[in-house]
Amino acid sequence: MLIDHAWGRETTTIADIHAYKPKSTSLSSGQVLPRGYAYDEGRVIVREMAEELALDMFNKRMAASSISLYLSYSFSSMLPPSKASTKTAPTASMRRICDTVVGLYDRIRVRNTPMHRVNIAYAVSDDLCQQYDLFTSPEKQDKERRLQRAIIDIRQKHGKNSVLRTMDLLDGARTIERHNQIGGHRA
């Protein structure tokens, strides 16, 4: 195979490429912050990112089964990055996902050190299955699903900044700025 590649021959066909199914897929989002963010400011950033990624996942009709969080601190602190992940019942609920991500953040964040980078990843499956539990009524879950669908529909019709939360207007929040970027760069 290496000799074939050295001579510019490729044995893989387009049909092979289209037939390939990965064992697992994920959705992720990350950002380098413009300055060091304190604990409370970082909490807002993490929640914003978790919500945006959860809406994107819901729109693609996927469900998260595992959630990972990676936080990096300033170089002057000499601290290693903080990492955590947790498995969940397959869900597309923005509320559940955000609560899980913020719980991970509260557990691993070094409180008195400025945070400079955040990455969130969801291990997802293509089937958007409805997972009911004993503690949440099906009516409540259906209402949340309709709300998520309404937010997505409004944003597709009127732009990403048409539906915002009040936390997106706080000092240090970055959602509005990120919505105006293309590929992480100013548009």
Image (cartoon, grey):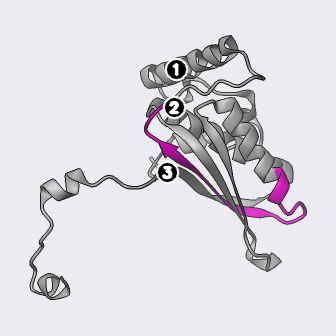
Q: Is residue 84 left or right of residue 177?
A: right
Foreground of the two, 6 or 16: 16
120 lies above or below 12: above
141 lies above or below 128: above
The residue tagged 3 is: 26
Q: Residue at x 44, y 25 (%)?
A: 156
In the rendered structure, which amino acid carries the disc numbered 3? Ser
Q: CA distance from mark 3 to mark 2?
A: 13 Å
Q: CA distance from mark 1 to mark 2?
A: 8 Å
- Give the quarter of the image for residue 71: bottom right
Label 1 secondary element = helix
Residue 58, labelled with which disc?
2
Residue 149, labelled with which disc?
1
Label 3 secondary element = strand
Label 2 secondary element = helix
- Give the quarter of the image for residue 81: bottom right
- The residue range painted magenta reads 106-128
In the rendered structure, which amino acid carries the disc numbered 1? Arg
Q: Earlier in the sequence, mark 1 or mark 2?
A: 2
Foreground of the two, 116 or 34: 116
Image quarter of the N terminus: bottom left
